[in-house]
Image (spheres, coloured by chain):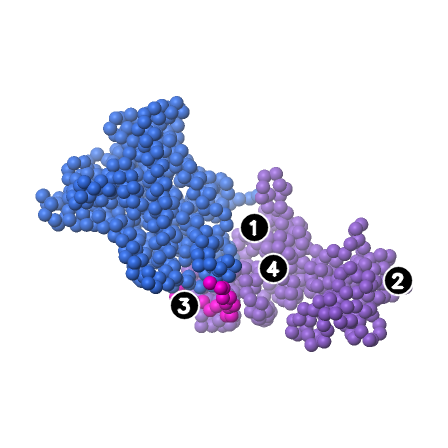
């Protein structure tokens, strides 16, 4: 189990006179053994610094890092990286260019007998699906193969924790999707504890058992990916995690029955911020069902744009009273064209938030 | 912030190395030179002439070297010139011949076969002779840089702005700027500091004037004053090449699987280009080789060669060069590591300080070391220790520059990964950092050895009593003994053979850039959109 408590780290300013850059501001993080955790954040949110502190590449200013009961980093304690037992898969793989694939994977297998080492390397290469490439050099491998070698290399010494630093970001979309599925299954079957750092929300959510969202050096949300996505802590987080429309509304409460009145009608509330009166309503494209204009219920709008993805399509529907078109996800074969009328109905209880500050505009 | 003690130690060592290499500069100022002394020098018209001549020669030789070096690199990497690898070797060959040897050979050849011509000793002739010996310093980095230009950039440039020369002018040449700057810096500093060749070619430059003041008139005050002028020129060059380097390194942007560069088909021009390409190295090393062979075998030779004397000079030269290379490699390491791994104003300033020491003329360095040795450790004066110290200070930047290239092959990420795999720092150093950086360290050591073995100016002033190096023996023969090169031939031959060895290693490293990469990695994006532009 990995436990990070109150971890802080700041860097000296880039220019003289500028304030120091706070990369980590009292971070808490708990990853139980065998759990795959994703740390999601925009660039500059401090997620890579967090990873580097756990690996021991950076010395934190304050806070404690405990792995499997051993304090790796804390006041007066600073384990050097090579004694931490933490494997890392860096962004571009960082395979040692002068060593073969087998030598790369075997690098961490010191103390093993030579024959045992060879067997273990072959076993690992088979595990990550590149058996037979043992004698290649890194520059003779494709990007995906390089990442597989980097993973095998990190797993070789059987680390207590595997850190993945945006390991798929340099790959093509299709390869990336395939490889991350594979990696998740592999790590799960091995029972490894892993922390993935990424700025790709789809990647973070699809892989994680436990999702942590960071912003400006702080943890702004942590929990099951479904919960974090469906009930984001604030509007900004909701927008960051996926396409969403935020519109003004007004809470109408009748005992336990909380509803919100807005441009899309009077909607049931799933996640209520707790006060009555004016509020903001977060609506996701998949929460809205589009139907023929002739039907009843919901509101009517005009399709202003359509992005076709094959399996589905995203419509942007203009609705009277809304400053921005509403994104709606429909089946790819749904026969909507730009200019068509559509009747929209919100099918899922929505999330509400306190009204936006003073200006009250929809940004 | 906590900081490992090792890094502080390395930084301190680097600063100490830079400080020692700045000793000659300190000497110039500490021995009391006023601005008045410098101005007084210009009362003599000869001084102004020498300054004008120095600047003129420097500009002309820089321009010629640039054209020859970049042109040759383009021919080898980017055209269908036959046998590009052979030509890479041929174009690098002039590096094996010391400037004063090839100047002396050219002069002797003219004296022997066309005494009235006066071509070699003219301003333009001297510039051509010098350029032919110096252009490889531009050629070698240009070859490497050319290989790194991603063909995709050129294709994009052609699409955006159709035209035959667009890729060359807009993509290739700008990408070459850092290489050209690095090469030009070495060329120009060589020209400014050259003594032997300038004397042979009958040119009067600041350096020859400084040496004359010291060796002929014993006027050290004038020598120091003129040296200050020379140092200002060198400092200007250092700043100038910095501007030329520009911002943004193309290599940093993308490192995908790049295709080998496109070669321009020469077609009907193939034969004329082949002739021109062959003429350049032939003109550069031809006279030396021809005059050496003639001197060793021809009827011109009166007495037999004293091979024992040649052997003694050879072993002395080799010894000094080896020790200098070893010491330079050792002391350059902290500077190279610091500036590569912890780039900061302080580390960059330290590296520049090393270059500044390289930019002051060798003669002044020798003077400074004599001054210090006689005052601090009189026992060391006229021993090999002082001479090796001079070599180390002179050629330290070459070691630093090559080691930086080597260290660039390593990355912090590799060290980090190695540590995460349980490797303690020493194992990381031995298994990861050193193997990657070793080629750069070896190249640096070889460059130092090469330049030390053909160095003339400081060697003349500092060589121990009763000891002779190849270059001092050769120089002795130029003073009237035999102007037709016969007496010089054995030493010239040795110097060229000695120079050929480091050249071989340099070329071997460069050839990897010239040949096509073995099994090309599978393309990531199979489909490529080809847009035909109207031509």
Mark earlier in primary sequence (4, 2): 4
Mark 1 or 2: in front is 2
Q: Residue under circle 2? A: A253
Q: CA distance from mark 4 to mark 2?
A: 41 Å
Mark earlier in primary sequence (1, 4): 1
Q: Nearer the viewer, residue A5 or B45?
A: B45
Q: Residue under circle 4? A: A197
The chain coloured blue in the image: B
Q: Residue under circle 1? A: A58
Q: Which residues are magenta?
A: B517-535
Q: Position of residue A142 (x, y in %)?
A: 48, 67
Q: Position of residue B153 (x, y in %)?
A: 48, 59
Q: Quadrant of residue B38?
A: top left
| Circle 4 SS class | strand
Residue at 35% across / 42% down in the picture?
A: B60
Residue at 69% across / 62% down in the picture?
A: A241
Q: Quadrant of residue B271?
A: bottom left
* Predominant secondary structure, magenta span: loop
| Circle 1 SS class | loop
Name the chain letter of the residue that bears numbered label 2. Answer: A
Residue at 28% across / 29% down in the picture?
A: B214
Mark 1 or 4: in front is 4
Q: Residue under circle 3? A: B519
Residue at 37% across / 60% down in the picture?
A: B79
Q: Nearer the viewer, residue A312 or A113?
A: A312
Name the chain letter of the residue that bears numbered label 3. Answer: B
Q: Colour of chain A?
A: purple
Give neighbour class at mark 3: few <14, some 14-19, many 20+ (Cα, 10 Å).
few
Q: CA distance from mark 1 to mark 3?
A: 39 Å
Name the chain letter of the residue that bears numbered label 4. Answer: A
């Amino acid at each position: 189990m990995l436990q990070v408590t109150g971890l802080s780290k700041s860097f000296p300013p880039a220019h003289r006179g500028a304030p120091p850059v706070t990369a980590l501001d009292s971070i808490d993080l708990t990853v139980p053994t065998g759990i795959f955790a994703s740390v999601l954040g925009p660039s500059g949110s401090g997620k890579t610094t967090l990873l580097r502190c756990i690996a021991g590449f950076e010395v934190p200013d304050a806070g404690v890092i405990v792995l499997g009961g051993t304090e790796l980093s804390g006041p007066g304690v600073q384990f050097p990286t090579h004694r931490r037992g933490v494997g890392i898969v860096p962004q571009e793989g960082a395979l040692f260019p002068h060593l073969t694939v087998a030598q790369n994977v075997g690098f961490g297998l010191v103390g093993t007998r030579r024959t045992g080492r060879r067997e273990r390397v072959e076993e690992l290469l088979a595990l990550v699906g590149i058996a037979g490439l043992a004698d290649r050099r890194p520059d003779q491998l494709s990007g995906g193969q390089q990442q597989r070698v980097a993973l095998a290399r990190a797993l070789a010494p059987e680390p207590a924790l595997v850190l993945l630093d945006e390991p798929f970001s340099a790959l093509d979309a299709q390869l990336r999707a395939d490889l991350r599925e594979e990696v998740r299954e592999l790590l799960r079957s091995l029972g490894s504890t892993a922390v993935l750092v990424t700025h790709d929300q789809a990647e973070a959510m699809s892989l994680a058992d436990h999702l942590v969202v960071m912003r400006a050096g702080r943890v702004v949300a942590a929990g099951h990916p479904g919960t974090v996505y469906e009930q984001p802590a604030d509007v900004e987080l909701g927008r960051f995690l996926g396409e969403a429309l935020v519109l003004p509304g007004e809470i109408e409460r009748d005992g336990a029955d909380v509803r919100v009145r807005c441009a899309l009608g009077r909607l049931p509330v799933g996640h209520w911020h707790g006060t009555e009166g004016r509020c903001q309503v977060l609506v996701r494209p998949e929460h809205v069902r589009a139907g023929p204009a002739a039907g009843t219920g919901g509101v009517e709008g005009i399709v202003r744009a359509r992005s076709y993805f094959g399996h589905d399509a995203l419509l942007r529907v203009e609705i009277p009273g809304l400053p921005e078109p509403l994104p709606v996800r429909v089946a790819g074969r749904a026969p909507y064209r730009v200019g068509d009328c559509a009747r929209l109905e919100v099918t899922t209880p929505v999330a509400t938030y306190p009204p936006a500050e003073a200006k009250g505009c929809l940004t | 912030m906590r900081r490992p003690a090792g890094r502080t130690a390395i930084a301190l060592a680097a600063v100490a190395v830079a400080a020692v290499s700045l000793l000659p500069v300190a000497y110039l100022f500490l021995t009391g030179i006023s601005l008045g002394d410098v101005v007084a020098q210009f009362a003599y018209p000869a001084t102004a002439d020498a300054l004008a001549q120095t600047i003129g020669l420097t500009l002309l030789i820089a321009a010629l070297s640039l054209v020859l070096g970049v042109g040759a690199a383009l021919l080898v990497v980017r055209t269908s010139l036959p046998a590009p690898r052979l030509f890479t070797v041929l174009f690098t060959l002039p590096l094996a011949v010391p400037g004063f040897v090839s100047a002396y050979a050219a002069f002797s050849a003219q004296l022997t076969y066309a005494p009235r011509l006066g071509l070699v000793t003219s301003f333009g002739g001297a510039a051509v002779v010098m350029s032919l010996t110096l252009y490889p310093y531009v050629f070698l980095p240009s070859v490497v840089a050319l290989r790194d230009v991603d063909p995709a950039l050129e294709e994009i440039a052609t699409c955006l702005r159709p035209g035959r020369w667009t890729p060359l002018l807009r993509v290739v040449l700008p990408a070459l700027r850092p290489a050209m700057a690095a090469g030009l810096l070495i060329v120009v500093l060589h020209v400014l500091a050259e003594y032997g060749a300038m004397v042979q070619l009958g040119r009067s430059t600041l350096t020859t004037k400084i040496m004359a003041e010291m060796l002929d008139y014993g006027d050290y005050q004038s020598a120091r004053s003129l040296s200050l002028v020379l140092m200002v020129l060198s400092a200007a060059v250092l700043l100038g090449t910095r501007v030329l380097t520009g911002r943004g390194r193309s290599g940093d942007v993308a490192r995908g699987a790049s295709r080998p560069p496109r070669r321009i088909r020469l077609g009907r021009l193939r034969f004329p280009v082949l002739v021109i390409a062959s003429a350049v190295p032939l003109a550069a090393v031809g006279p030396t080789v021809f005059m050496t062979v003639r001197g060793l075998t021809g009827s011109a030779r009166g007495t037999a060669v004293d091979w024992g004397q040649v052997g003694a000079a050879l072993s002395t030269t080799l010894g000094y060069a080896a020790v200098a290379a070893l010491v330079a490699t050792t002391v350059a390491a902290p500077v190279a590591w610091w500036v590569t791994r912890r780039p900061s104003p302080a580390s960059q300033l330290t590296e520049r300080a090393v270059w500044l020491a390289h930019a002051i003329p060798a003669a002044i360095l020798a003077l400074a070391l004599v001054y210090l040795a006689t005052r601090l450790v009189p026992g060391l004066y006229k021993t090999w220790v002082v001479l090796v110290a001079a070599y180390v200070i002179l050629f330290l930047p070459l070691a630093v520059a090559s080691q930086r290239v080597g260290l660039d092959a390593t990355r912090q990420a590799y060290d980090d990964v190695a540590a995460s795999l349980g490797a303690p720092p020493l194992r990381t150093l031995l298994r990861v950092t050193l193997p990657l950086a070793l080629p750069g360290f070896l190249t640096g050591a070889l460059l130092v050895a090469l330049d030390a073995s053909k160095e003339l100016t400081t060697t003349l002033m500092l060589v121990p009593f009763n000891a002779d190096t190849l270059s001092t023996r050769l120089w002795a023969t130029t003073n009237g003994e035999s102007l037709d090169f016969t007496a010089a031939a054995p030493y010239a031959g040795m110097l060229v053979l000695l120079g050929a060895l480091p050249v071989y290693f340099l070329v071997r490293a460069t050839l990897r850039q010239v040949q096509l990469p073995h099994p090309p990695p599978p393309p990531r994006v199979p489909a490529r959109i080809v847009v035909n532009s109207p031509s």
